[in-house]
Image (cartoon, grey):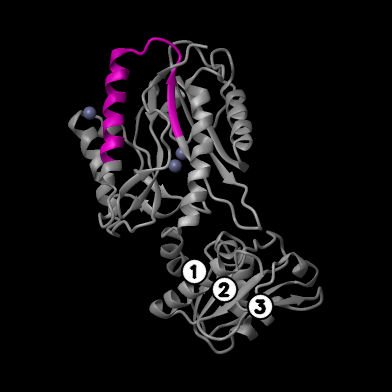
Amino acid sequence: MGSLAPVFANRFDRVRRAMQAEGVDVLLLSVGPDLPWLTGYAAMPLERLTMLVLPVDGEATMLLPAFETARVAPHPDLFRIEGWEETHDPIARTAELVGSATELAIGDHTWSRFTVLLQGAMPQASWRNAGTVTGPLRAAKEPAEIAALQRAASGVDRVATALRGGEIPLIGRTEADVAAELGRRVVAEGHAKVNFSIVASGPNAASPHHEPGDRVIRPNEIVLCDFGGTTEEPDGQHGYCSDLTRCVFTGEIPAEIAEAYAHLLDAQQAATAAAVVGTPAGAVDAVARGHLAEHGLDHYFLHRLGHGIGVEAHEDPYLVEGNDVPLAAGNAFSVEPGVYVEGVWGARIEDIVVATDDGPRPLNTVDRELAVVDV
Ligand code: ZN
Ligand code: ZN
Ligand code: ZN
């Protein structure tokens, strides 16, 4: 047992309590982030089935290809490891382990090639997404998880500091070239991999998920940069994600853009201040939208305010109109309002924020003003 054994034991306890509360008999976890969050082991994303079969009470089994069992750090107090040989039928074996249980929850990312076969093998069962059990648990971050998210956030903050300081030349380079440099810097700042690197210049900044291409960045335009990755964590623990957006301007900022940007920043700050424990997630979205509406800018805000973040780049809770679930201590999420004027320009300001009992705490602290970078 490694030093993380107490972490996983605690998560097993919380998962089983949530299963009890939700009336789930057996949890089935394969590829996707739930399994490494719970056990430290990430299933190989291949055609051979890996499946943790976790009954609400009774022994849990990690079923996986026999020749992959050596990859699993054993936690015999939490689950037994069972290898299946090439000629065995892991679907039938999973059904055997489930037995006569009827209320099953299966990992949200499980491939349908497995799910459909499992459903055929267990016609007695009713199925739901494991996210109904694991989502709220993963959303309430433990102190060590907040610390990992802070390390991730500080890493991308340093990249943004270099961007704002003119250390990353923009004018005359393609968006794709700048995006690649941002990605290299994200990795150099403690990330195992880059999840996305958006560079959107001029009119392209009006497209929230712009794919950076061969457009050459010119003087006197906005450049929106949204980048993040997943950290490298020790001892096989799953990494945690970063996600940051900052905009810079390659020349003198026109008054109209300066004014709209100032209101966007007001909206972002007001929403951050409103992200207090107990406030419905949707109400935080409404604060940002309300401020933009006061200045006639709400029609340019095309997406929800934010998303939770953790071992996944997007996870619970979602800050969106209609989500009445109150924010809980330990929730970590983005606060990222934007204005997008089609064909003309756009801007977004994004920080990761944690709801704590002492109030909202932004993990990203790099300056949010629209910086001039004329290199
Ligand atoms: Zn982002
Ligand atoms: Zn985001
Ligand atoms: Zn304002």
Q: Is residue 345 left or right of residue 215?
A: left
Q: Foreground: 208 or 20? A: 20
Magenta span of residues: 245-271
Q: Foreground: 203 or 274? A: 274
Estimate how packed mark 2 is, as few (under 14), some (14 to 19) or many (20 or more) residues with alpha carbons within 10 Å.
many
Q: Which residue is mark 1?
A: 130
| Camera sees residue 242 | no
Residue 148 image offset from top left, x and y in percent: 52, 49
Whether tag 2 and tag 1 are in contact, CB under 8 A, the answer is yes
Residue 71 image-quadrant placement? bottom right
Q: Is residue 284 left or right of residue 172?
A: left
In terms of sequence position, does the residue under pointer 1 or pointer 3 come before the other?
3
Whether tag 3 and tag 2 are in contact, CB under 8 A, the answer is no
As drawn, 231 above or below 184: below
Residue 69 image-quadrant placement? bottom right
| Camera sees residue 248 | yes
Q: Which residue is mark 2?
A: 28
Q: Which residue is mark 3?
A: 76
* Magenta-colored segment: predominant secondary structure: helix
Secondary structure beneath label 2: strand
Instruction: Single out the mark in the foreground, 3 or 2.
Output: 3
Q: What type is the residue that disc 1 sits on?
A: Ala
- Tell me how far mark 2 sits from mark 1, CA to CA: 8 Å
Which residue shows up at 34% across the image and 57% down it?
Answer: 329
Say if disc 2 is inside 8 Å of ligand 2: no
Q: Foreground: 29 or 74? A: 74
Secondary structure beneath label 3: loop
As drawn, 346 above or below 355: above
Specify the quarter for ligand 2: top left
Quadrant into which the N terminus falls: bottom right
